[in-house]
Amino acid sequence: MGNWSRTKVLRLAKGFQGRAKNCYSLAIVRLHKSLQHAYRGRKLRRRIARRDWITRINSALSEQSVKYSCFIHGLNVYSNVALNRKVLAELAVNEPYSFRAVVNEVIEPVSYTHLTLPTICSV
């Protein structure tokens, strides 16, 4: 921001309250802080979206008496299903029968493996 002109700073500060939209010395400080908030907000948006996907998947799994952690473990280790959380959340909300088929595909190999699984994941 060192080589930004006065007009560019004031143009970007348009919409700020008080003297922060008119006074250059206040506008540059407020603009710097607003750009920090925007950067952090872009990271938070992804984090919040992932949290919402996990909540939707967990809600759909609880209807089928399957724990989220066991489902994800089976999805990553024992199955050939290559769906991410975003797609799984969309299936859980819009296509419950398809989601149930995916859950059955993931959980069945876990219940029949000869490997020792934690007792919380036993079906």
Image (cartoon, grey):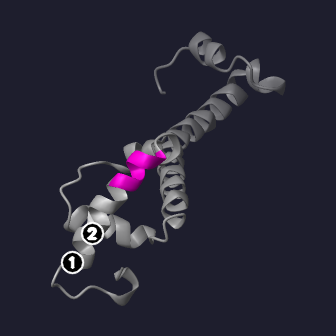
Q: Amino acid at mark 1?
A: Tyr
* Viewer-proximal residue among 32 and 67: 67
Q: Amino acid at mark 2?
A: Glu
Q: Which residues are magenta?
A: 96-101
> Would residue 8 be counted in the magenta stretch?
no
Query: Which quadrant: the C terminus?
Result: bottom left
Q: Position of residue 9 (x, y in %)?
A: 60, 18
Could you say which disc has been placed on residue 108 in the image? 2
* Viewer-proximal residue among 104 and 30: 104
Q: Main secondary structure of the magenta part?
A: helix
Q: Position of residue 112 (x, y in %)?
A: 21, 78
Regarding mark 2 in the picture, which secondary structure is present there? helix
Q: Are marks 1 and 2 in contact (CB under 8 Å)?
A: yes
Q: Is residue 74 above or below residue 80?
A: below
* Viewer-proximal residue among 54 and 26: 54
Q: Is residue 96 above or below residue 7?
A: below
* Viewer-proximal residue among 121 and 29: 121
Name the residue: 23% across, 50% down: 82
Regarding mark 1 in the picture, which secondary structure is present there? helix
Could you say which disc has been placed on residue 102 in the image? none
Name the residue: 31% across, 68% down: 107
Q: Is residue 55 left or right of residue 71?
A: right
Residue that numbered label 1 is attached to? 112
